[in-house]
Image: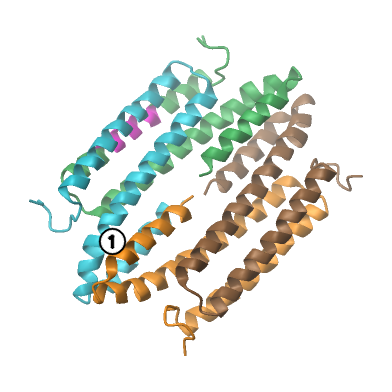
Chain colours: A brown, B orange, C cyan, D green
Amino acid sequence: MEKNAHSMVSQRNKQDLLNRMRRLEGQVRGITKMIEDDRYCVDILLQISASRAGLQKVGLSILDSHTRGCVTSAIKENRGDEMVDELIDVLDRFMK
Amino acid sequence: MEKNAHSMVSQRNKQDLLNRMRRLEGQVRGITKMIEDDRYCVDILLQISASRAGLQKVGLSILDSHTRGCVTSAIKENRGDEMVDELIDVLDRFMK
Amino acid sequence: MEKNAHSMVSQRNKQDLLNRMRRLEGQVRGITKMIEDDRYCVDILLQISASRAGLQKVGLSILDSHTRGCVTSAIKENRGDEMVDELIDVLDRFMK
Amino acid sequence: MEKNAHSMVSQRNKQDLLNRMRRLEGQVRGITKMIEDDRYCVDILLQISASRAGLQKVGLSILDSHTRGCVTSAIKENRGDEMVDELIDVLDRFMK
Protein backbone atom coordinates (compact mmCIF):
# COMPACT_ATOMS: atom_id res chain seq x y z
CA MET A 1 0.00 0.00 0.00
CA GLU A 2 3.09 2.23 -0.06
CA LYS A 3 2.74 4.96 -2.64
CA ASN A 4 6.47 5.30 -2.77
CA ALA A 5 8.88 2.44 -3.08
CA HIS A 6 11.46 4.38 -1.07
CA SER A 7 9.18 4.63 1.93
CA MET A 8 9.73 1.80 4.32
CA VAL A 9 7.67 3.09 7.21
CA SER A 10 5.10 0.39 8.00
CA GLN A 11 1.44 1.41 8.07
CA ARG A 12 1.26 0.86 11.81
CA ASN A 13 4.37 2.86 12.51
CA LYS A 14 3.09 5.51 10.10
CA GLN A 15 -0.13 5.98 12.06
CA ASP A 16 1.87 6.30 15.28
CA LEU A 17 4.15 8.89 13.66
CA LEU A 18 1.16 10.85 12.34
CA ASN A 19 -0.41 10.89 15.82
CA ARG A 20 2.80 12.15 17.32
CA MET A 21 3.14 14.79 14.61
CA ARG A 22 -0.41 16.09 15.26
CA ARG A 23 0.45 16.45 18.93
CA LEU A 24 3.66 18.25 17.98
CA GLU A 25 1.72 20.57 15.66
CA GLY A 26 -0.48 21.47 18.65
CA GLN A 27 2.56 21.98 20.86
CA VAL A 28 4.21 24.29 18.32
CA ARG A 29 0.99 26.31 17.93
CA GLY A 30 0.94 26.44 21.75
CA ILE A 31 4.39 28.07 21.73
CA THR A 32 3.18 30.76 19.31
CA LYS A 33 0.20 31.41 21.61
CA MET A 34 2.47 31.64 24.67
CA ILE A 35 4.64 34.27 22.93
CA GLU A 36 1.50 36.12 21.82
CA ASP A 37 0.18 36.11 25.40
CA ASP A 38 3.51 37.33 26.85
CA ARG A 39 3.86 34.22 28.94
CA TYR A 40 6.86 33.74 31.21
CA CYS A 41 10.03 33.15 29.15
CA VAL A 42 11.17 30.08 31.06
CA ASP A 43 7.81 28.37 30.49
CA ILE A 44 8.09 29.08 26.77
CA LEU A 45 11.66 27.74 26.74
CA LEU A 46 10.54 24.51 28.43
CA GLN A 47 7.82 24.10 25.81
CA ILE A 48 10.32 24.67 23.02
CA SER A 49 12.61 22.10 24.61
CA ALA A 50 9.76 19.56 24.74
CA SER A 51 8.85 20.13 21.08
CA ARG A 52 12.45 19.73 19.99
CA ALA A 53 12.70 16.48 21.94
CA GLY A 54 9.44 15.28 20.36
CA LEU A 55 10.72 16.06 16.86
CA GLN A 56 13.97 14.27 17.68
CA LYS A 57 12.00 11.19 18.70
CA VAL A 58 10.00 11.20 15.46
CA GLY A 59 13.28 11.61 13.58
CA LEU A 60 14.87 8.68 15.38
CA SER A 61 11.88 6.52 14.56
CA ILE A 62 12.10 7.47 10.87
CA LEU A 63 15.84 6.83 10.98
CA ASP A 64 15.08 3.38 12.36
CA SER A 65 12.62 2.56 9.55
CA HIS A 66 14.99 4.00 6.99
CA THR A 67 17.92 1.88 8.14
CA ARG A 68 15.80 -1.24 8.41
CA GLY A 69 14.15 -0.53 5.05
CA CYS A 70 15.99 1.44 2.41
CA VAL A 71 19.52 1.02 3.76
CA THR A 72 19.06 -2.71 4.32
CA SER A 73 17.66 -3.24 0.80
CA ALA A 74 20.45 -1.21 -0.74
CA ILE A 75 23.10 -3.19 1.11
CA LYS A 76 21.56 -6.50 0.05
CA GLU A 77 21.65 -5.31 -3.55
CA ASN A 78 25.29 -4.25 -3.20
CA ARG A 79 24.52 -0.59 -3.58
CA GLY A 80 24.88 0.21 0.10
CA ASP A 81 27.83 2.60 -0.01
CA GLU A 82 26.00 5.57 -1.44
CA MET A 83 23.14 4.97 0.99
CA VAL A 84 25.49 4.96 3.96
CA ASP A 85 27.10 8.20 2.69
CA GLU A 86 23.68 9.79 2.66
CA LEU A 87 22.81 8.34 6.09
CA ILE A 88 25.99 9.66 7.74
CA ASP A 89 25.41 13.03 6.12
CA VAL A 90 21.89 13.28 7.55
CA LEU A 91 23.11 12.10 10.97
CA ASP A 92 25.70 14.84 10.95
CA ARG A 93 23.01 17.47 10.50
CA PHE A 94 20.72 15.73 12.92
CA MET A 95 23.18 15.72 15.76
CA LYS A 96 23.40 19.48 15.86
CA MET B 1 2.07 47.58 26.63
CA GLU B 2 3.17 44.22 28.05
CA LYS B 3 0.29 42.24 29.48
CA ASN B 4 2.65 40.43 31.76
CA ALA B 5 5.30 42.05 33.90
CA HIS B 6 7.52 39.01 33.56
CA SER B 7 7.63 39.28 29.82
CA MET B 8 10.57 41.27 28.63
CA VAL B 9 10.29 40.53 24.96
CA SER B 10 10.04 43.88 23.19
CA GLN B 11 7.09 44.40 20.84
CA ARG B 12 9.38 44.46 17.83
CA ASN B 13 11.20 41.32 18.83
CA LYS B 14 7.82 39.75 19.64
CA GLN B 15 6.53 40.33 16.12
CA ASP B 16 9.70 38.81 14.69
CA LEU B 17 9.32 35.76 16.96
CA LEU B 18 5.66 35.36 15.98
CA ASN B 19 6.58 35.47 12.28
CA ARG B 20 9.23 32.86 12.81
CA MET B 21 6.82 30.68 14.81
CA ARG B 22 4.18 30.84 12.02
CA ARG B 23 6.79 29.66 9.55
CA LEU B 24 7.76 26.87 11.94
CA GLU B 25 4.11 25.86 12.33
CA GLY B 26 3.94 25.52 8.55
CA GLN B 27 7.18 23.55 8.49
CA VAL B 28 5.94 21.13 11.16
CA ARG B 29 2.64 20.65 9.30
CA GLY B 30 4.77 20.02 6.21
CA ILE B 31 6.55 17.17 8.03
CA THR B 32 3.21 15.54 8.88
CA LYS B 33 2.21 15.82 5.22
CA MET B 34 5.52 14.29 4.09
CA ILE B 35 4.96 11.30 6.37
CA GLU B 36 1.37 11.01 5.15
CA ASP B 37 2.55 11.04 1.53
CA ASP B 38 5.25 8.41 2.16
CA ARG B 39 7.97 10.82 1.13
CA TYR B 40 11.59 9.74 1.17
CA CYS B 41 12.86 9.30 4.75
CA VAL B 42 16.01 11.35 4.30
CA ASP B 43 14.00 14.32 3.00
CA ILE B 44 11.73 14.09 6.05
CA LEU B 45 14.76 13.89 8.34
CA LEU B 46 16.25 17.03 6.79
CA GLN B 47 12.96 18.85 7.32
CA ILE B 48 12.84 17.71 10.96
CA SER B 49 16.41 18.92 11.38
CA ALA B 50 15.52 22.32 9.95
CA SER B 51 12.49 22.68 12.25
CA ARG B 52 14.53 21.75 15.30
CA ALA B 53 17.16 24.33 14.34
CA GLY B 54 14.42 26.94 13.85
CA LEU B 55 12.96 26.21 17.30
CA GLN B 56 16.44 26.43 18.80
CA LYS B 57 16.88 29.86 17.24
CA VAL B 58 13.57 31.09 18.65
CA GLY B 59 14.59 29.67 22.03
CA LEU B 60 17.93 31.45 21.93
CA SER B 61 16.22 34.71 21.12
CA ILE B 62 13.83 34.27 24.06
CA LEU B 63 16.77 33.34 26.27
CA ASP B 64 18.43 36.58 25.19
CA SER B 65 15.36 38.69 26.08
CA HIS B 66 14.94 36.79 29.33
CA THR B 67 18.53 37.39 30.42
CA ARG B 68 18.46 41.04 29.40
CA GLY B 69 15.03 41.50 31.01
CA CYS B 70 13.98 39.34 33.94
CA VAL B 71 17.43 38.14 34.99
CA THR B 72 18.92 41.64 34.79
CA SER B 73 16.06 43.15 36.84
CA ALA B 74 16.32 40.40 39.43
CA ILE B 75 20.07 40.89 39.80
CA LYS B 76 19.68 44.66 40.19
CA GLU B 77 17.13 44.04 42.95
CA ASN B 78 19.50 41.58 44.65
CA ARG B 79 17.28 38.59 44.00
CA GLY B 80 19.36 37.24 41.15
CA ASP B 81 20.44 33.90 42.66
CA GLU B 82 17.12 32.14 42.31
CA MET B 83 16.78 33.49 38.78
CA VAL B 84 20.19 32.16 37.79
CA ASP B 85 19.30 28.74 39.29
CA GLU B 86 16.23 28.67 37.08
CA LEU B 87 18.20 29.87 34.05
CA ILE B 88 20.88 27.19 34.42
CA ASP B 89 18.19 24.57 34.90
CA VAL B 90 16.45 25.56 31.67
CA LEU B 91 19.79 25.67 29.83
CA ASP B 92 20.52 22.16 31.00
CA ARG B 93 17.31 20.89 29.39
CA PHE B 94 17.80 23.05 26.38
CA MET B 95 21.21 21.70 25.56
CA LYS B 96 19.91 18.20 25.07
CA MET C 1 42.80 34.25 46.19
CA GLU C 2 41.78 34.41 42.54
CA LYS C 3 44.69 35.16 40.25
CA ASN C 4 42.30 36.61 37.74
CA ALA C 5 39.59 39.12 38.53
CA HIS C 6 37.43 37.71 35.74
CA SER C 7 37.35 34.28 37.28
CA MET C 8 34.40 33.81 39.55
CA VAL C 9 34.71 30.09 40.09
CA SER C 10 34.91 29.56 43.86
CA GLN C 11 37.88 27.57 45.19
CA ARG C 12 35.60 24.72 46.23
CA ASN C 13 33.84 24.57 42.91
CA LYS C 14 37.22 24.86 41.20
CA GLN C 15 38.55 21.76 42.95
CA ASP C 16 35.43 19.85 41.98
CA LEU C 17 35.82 20.97 38.35
CA LEU C 18 39.49 19.96 38.33
CA ASN C 19 38.61 16.50 39.68
CA ARG C 20 35.99 16.08 37.01
CA MET C 21 38.39 17.23 34.32
CA ARG C 22 41.06 14.71 35.43
CA ARG C 23 38.47 11.95 35.14
CA LEU C 24 37.51 13.25 31.70
CA GLU C 25 41.17 13.32 30.65
CA GLY C 26 41.34 9.64 31.61
CA GLN C 27 38.14 8.88 29.74
CA VAL C 28 39.39 10.58 26.59
CA ARG C 29 42.72 8.71 26.77
CA GLY C 30 40.59 5.59 27.21
CA ILE C 31 38.84 6.30 23.91
CA THR C 32 42.20 6.58 22.11
CA LYS C 33 43.22 3.24 23.63
CA MET C 34 39.95 1.63 22.55
CA ILE C 35 40.50 2.77 18.96
CA GLU C 36 44.11 1.55 19.12
CA ASP C 37 42.97 -1.85 20.38
CA ASP C 38 40.27 -2.17 17.67
CA ARG C 39 37.54 -2.38 20.27
CA TYR C 40 33.92 -2.74 19.22
CA CYS C 41 32.66 0.47 17.57
CA VAL C 42 29.49 0.71 19.64
CA ASP C 43 31.47 0.53 22.89
CA ILE C 44 33.72 3.33 21.65
CA LEU C 45 30.68 5.40 20.65
CA LEU C 46 29.17 4.99 24.12
CA GLN C 47 32.43 6.13 25.69
CA ILE C 48 32.54 9.18 23.38
CA SER C 49 28.94 9.94 24.34
CA ALA C 50 29.82 9.75 28.04
CA SER C 51 32.82 12.07 27.63
CA ARG C 52 30.76 14.60 25.69
CA ALA C 53 28.12 14.54 28.42
CA GLY C 54 30.84 14.99 31.06
CA LEU C 55 32.28 17.99 29.23
CA GLN C 56 28.78 19.44 28.88
CA LYS C 57 28.32 19.15 32.65
CA VAL C 58 31.61 20.92 33.34
CA GLY C 59 30.56 23.60 30.86
CA LEU C 60 27.21 24.07 32.54
CA SER C 61 28.90 24.44 35.90
CA ILE C 62 31.27 27.09 34.50
CA LEU C 63 28.32 28.81 32.85
CA ASP C 64 26.63 28.89 36.25
CA SER C 65 29.65 30.48 37.96
CA HIS C 66 30.08 32.89 35.08
CA THR C 67 26.47 34.07 35.24
CA ARG C 68 26.53 34.34 39.02
CA GLY C 69 29.93 36.05 38.94
CA CYS C 70 30.97 38.09 35.93
CA VAL C 71 27.54 38.63 34.41
CA THR C 72 25.99 39.61 37.76
CA SER C 73 28.80 42.09 38.52
CA ALA C 74 28.56 43.58 35.05
CA ILE C 75 24.81 44.04 35.35
CA LYS C 76 25.14 45.71 38.76
CA GLU C 77 27.66 48.11 37.28
CA ASN C 78 25.32 48.85 34.36
CA ARG C 79 27.59 47.27 31.80
CA GLY C 80 25.54 44.11 31.45
CA ASP C 81 24.50 44.38 27.80
CA GLU C 82 27.84 43.49 26.28
CA MET C 83 28.20 40.64 28.76
CA VAL C 84 24.81 39.21 27.82
CA ASP C 85 25.75 39.48 24.11
CA GLU C 86 28.83 37.40 24.81
CA LEU C 87 26.86 34.93 26.95
CA ILE C 88 24.21 34.35 24.27
CA ASP C 89 26.93 33.94 21.69
CA VAL C 90 28.68 31.26 23.71
CA LEU C 91 25.34 29.51 24.42
CA ASP C 92 24.65 29.41 20.71
CA ARG C 93 27.88 27.52 20.09
CA PHE C 94 27.39 25.40 23.15
CA MET C 95 24.00 24.14 22.13
CA LYS C 96 25.29 22.53 18.98
CA MET D 1 45.65 -7.05 10.57
CA GLU D 2 42.57 -6.32 12.68
CA LYS D 3 42.90 -7.84 16.13
CA ASN D 4 39.15 -7.88 16.44
CA ALA D 5 36.77 -9.17 13.84
CA HIS D 6 34.15 -6.67 14.91
CA SER D 7 36.36 -3.73 14.16
CA MET D 8 35.87 -2.44 10.69
CA VAL D 9 37.89 0.73 10.95
CA SER D 10 40.45 0.62 8.15
CA GLN D 11 44.09 1.07 9.10
CA ARG D 12 44.25 4.41 7.31
CA ASN D 13 41.11 5.70 8.95
CA LYS D 14 42.38 4.35 12.26
CA GLN D 15 45.59 6.38 12.05
CA ASP D 16 43.57 9.48 11.25
CA LEU D 17 41.28 8.83 14.22
CA LEU D 18 44.26 8.28 16.53
CA ASN D 19 45.81 11.58 15.41
CA ARG D 20 42.56 13.37 16.05
CA MET D 21 42.21 11.74 19.46
CA ARG D 22 45.75 12.82 20.48
CA ARG D 23 44.87 16.39 19.57
CA LEU D 24 41.65 16.05 21.58
CA GLU D 25 43.58 14.69 24.56
CA GLY D 26 45.74 17.81 24.43
CA GLN D 27 42.70 20.04 24.11
CA VAL D 28 41.04 18.42 27.14
CA ARG D 29 44.24 18.77 29.19
CA GLY D 30 44.27 22.39 28.04
CA ILE D 31 40.79 22.90 29.53
CA THR D 32 41.98 21.55 32.89
CA LYS D 33 44.93 23.96 32.74
CA MET D 34 42.63 26.88 31.91
CA ILE D 35 40.45 26.11 34.94
CA GLU D 36 43.58 25.76 37.10
CA ASP D 37 44.87 29.12 35.89
CA ASP D 38 41.52 30.85 36.52
CA ARG D 39 41.20 31.76 32.87
CA TYR D 40 38.19 33.68 31.63
CA CYS D 41 35.02 31.52 31.75
CA VAL D 42 33.92 32.29 28.21
CA ASP D 43 37.30 31.22 26.82
CA ILE D 44 37.04 27.94 28.74
CA LEU D 45 33.50 27.42 27.45
CA LEU D 46 34.63 27.92 23.86
CA GLN D 47 37.39 25.37 24.38
CA ILE D 48 34.89 22.88 25.86
CA SER D 49 32.62 23.49 22.88
CA ALA D 50 35.48 22.79 20.46
CA SER D 51 36.43 19.55 22.24
CA ARG D 52 32.84 18.35 22.23
CA ALA D 53 32.60 19.08 18.51
CA GLY D 54 35.88 17.23 17.93
CA LEU D 55 34.62 14.17 19.84
CA GLN D 56 31.39 14.30 17.85
CA LYS D 57 33.38 14.24 14.62
CA VAL D 58 35.40 11.23 15.75
CA GLY D 59 32.13 9.56 16.75
CA LEU D 60 30.57 10.23 13.38
CA SER D 61 33.59 8.77 11.63
CA ILE D 62 33.39 5.61 13.79
CA LEU D 63 29.65 5.45 13.12
CA ASP D 64 30.44 5.59 9.42
CA SER D 65 32.93 2.71 9.62
CA HIS D 66 30.57 0.75 11.83
CA THR D 67 27.67 1.08 9.41
CA ARG D 68 29.81 0.30 6.39
CA GLY D 69 31.48 -2.59 8.23
CA CYS D 70 29.62 -4.44 10.98
CA VAL D 71 26.11 -3.35 10.07
CA THR D 72 26.60 -4.09 6.39
CA SER D 73 28.04 -7.57 7.11
CA ALA D 74 25.22 -8.35 9.52
CA ILE D 75 22.58 -7.31 6.99
CA LYS D 76 24.17 -9.42 4.25
CA GLU D 77 24.11 -12.41 6.59
CA ASN D 78 20.43 -11.76 7.42
CA ARG D 79 21.17 -10.87 11.02
CA GLY D 80 20.78 -7.13 10.54
CA ASP D 81 17.79 -6.47 12.80
CA GLU D 82 19.61 -6.77 16.10
CA MET D 83 22.46 -4.67 14.72
CA VAL D 84 20.08 -1.92 13.67
CA ASP D 85 18.45 -1.99 17.13
CA GLU D 86 21.85 -1.44 18.67
CA LEU D 87 22.71 1.28 16.14
CA ILE D 88 19.50 3.23 16.80
CA ASP D 89 20.06 2.88 20.54
CA VAL D 90 23.56 4.34 20.29
CA LEU D 91 22.33 7.14 18.01
CA ASP D 92 19.69 8.03 20.58
CA ARG D 93 22.37 8.56 23.23
CA PHE D 94 24.66 10.23 20.79
CA MET D 95 22.19 12.87 19.78
CA LYS D 96 21.89 14.27 23.27
Q: Nearer the viewer, residue A39 or A89?
A: A39
**Image-quadrant location for residue D27:** top left
Q: For mark 1, name the chain.
A: C
Of the residues shown, which amino acid type is indicated by label 1?
Answer: Thr
Q: Is residue B19 above or below residue A45?
A: below
Q: Is residue C34 above or below residue D28?
A: above
**Image-quadrant location for residue B47:** bottom right
In the rendered image, residue A82, in percent from the top left (x then y), is placed at 69, 34
Q: Is residue D85 above or below residue B9?
A: above
By secondary structure, the bulk of the magenta-drawn segment is best described as helix
Q: Residue at x 46, y 82 (%)?
A: B4
- Horizontal relation, residue D66 to residue B36: left or right: left
In the rendered image, residue C91, in percent from the top left (x then y), is placed at 39, 58
In the rendered image, residue B96, in percent from the top left (x then y), is placed at 49, 49
> Circle 1: is it few (<14), some (14-19), or many (20+) Cα within 10 Å?
many
Q: Residue at x 50, y 44 (%)?
A: D96
Based on the picture, tell me whether residue D25 belongs to the magenta stretch: yes
Q: Which residues are magenta?
A: D19-29
- Is residue A27 something one can see in this rendering? yes
- Horizontal relation, residue D40 to residue A40: left or right: left
Q: Residue at x 54, y 81 (%)?
A: B15
- Is residue B39 something one can see in this rendering? no
Q: Which residue is mark 1?
A: C67
In the rendered image, residue B26, in percent from the top left (x then y), is placed at 69, 68
Task: Residue lying at the far bottom in this picture: please name it.
Answer: B1
- Quadrant containing the N terminus of chain A is top right
State the SS at label 1: helix
Based on the picture, tell me whether residue A60 belongs to the magenta stretch: no
Q: Residue at x 62, y 22 (%)?
A: D69
Q: Nearer the viewer, residue D69 or B59?
A: B59
